[in-house]
Structures are given as structure tokens and as C-alpha cells.
Image (cartoon, grey):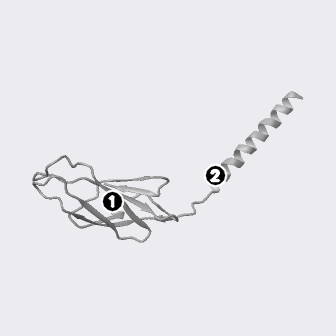
Amino acid sequence: MKLWKKSLAGLIGAVLLTALAAGTALAAESRTKITSVSITIDSDISVGDSGGSVTATANGSNYDVTDVDIVNDDGEWVDGDVPRVEITLEADSDYYFASMAKSKVSLKGDKATYVSSRREDSSSTLIIT
């Protein structure tokens, strides 16, 4: 009798685990995926200057630029220095960012080049370097 109860309890446990796993697998993403981004960049950084600024404008309709940060602003810019900039994009509420390869990120203006990108906040934030 004890063996029968243990078997039944094991069977019920397996059924519950299977039902939970199936429920999470069937949950679909309700937001729309953003598969590419386009940004226009403008900079007033010059050799011999200290500081300077970089602005970025989103060219898409489902995301906005929320922050632009120069991560290697160490004082006076000298010839050969290349500003390294992180641009933060926020997706509109019904959208999210897919993983962004170099070919999916268009940077226009001031000789900007793509280095990397990462997603945060359940893919609603994209940070491009």
C-alpha cells in the first residue's frame, strides 16, 4: 500500500511539473521586435579642446535616444584620440530590441563606427558603443 501511494505521489508531481513547463513554453512575446536601428550622430569634439559634446538622434519611430555618454573623456583631446560613446535607446512600450549585429545598426554622421551593443531591462533598452 505504501508503494502505491509513493507511486501516485510521484506521478502527480511529474504531471504538475510537465504542466508548469508547458505553460511557460507557450507564453508568447506580446511586444513587437525591433530588428534594426538608425541613428544620426553629431559631435563638436576638437583636437586641443577639453570636453565637448556628442548628440544622437533616433531615425526610427519605435525607439528614442535617452542618453549619450562619452566614456573616454579624460581631458584634452589630442590628435589620434577617438571618442568612445555609449548611446542608450529606449523602445516604445509595445516594442523590444532584438539582438543587434553590426549590419543591423546604421550610424550616420561624424565618421561613427559600431563597436558593440547590449540589451537591458527585458530588451526594452539597447546600449550601442
Residue at 47% from the left image edge and 58% from the top image edge: 124
Question: Is residue 91 positioned above or below 84 on the image?
Answer: below
Question: Is residue 29 positioned above or below 81 on the image?
Answer: below
* In this rendering, position of residue 32 left or right of residue 126: right
Q: Earlier in the sequence, mark 1 or mark 2?
A: 2
* In this rendering, position of residue 84 left or right of residue 125: left
Residue 35 quadrant: bottom left
Three-letter amino acid code at the position of disc 1: Lys
Within 10 Å of the Cα at label 1, are there few (<14), some (14-19), or many (20+) other Cα atoms? few
Residue 33, percent across and down? 49, 64
* In this rendering, position of residue 29 left or right of residue 62: right
Three-letter amino acid code at the position of disc 2: Thr
Instruction: Give the residue at mark 2.
Output: 24
Residue at 81% from the left image edge and 31% from the top image edge: 6
Question: Is residue 11 positioned above or below 62 on the image?
Answer: above
Instruction: Give the residue at mark 1.
Output: 102
- Viewport quadrant of the N terminus: top right
Residue 5, percent across and down? 85, 32
- What kind of element bears circle 1? helix
Distance from the alpha carbon under mark 1 to that under mark 2: 32 Å
- The single residue placed furthest to the right in the displayed view is 1
* In this rendering, position of residue 95 left or right of residue 15: left
Residue at 33% from the left image edge and 59% from the top image edge: 102
The tag on residue 6 is: none
Residue at 77% from the left image edge and 36% from the top image edge: 10
- Viewport quadrant of the C terminus: bottom left
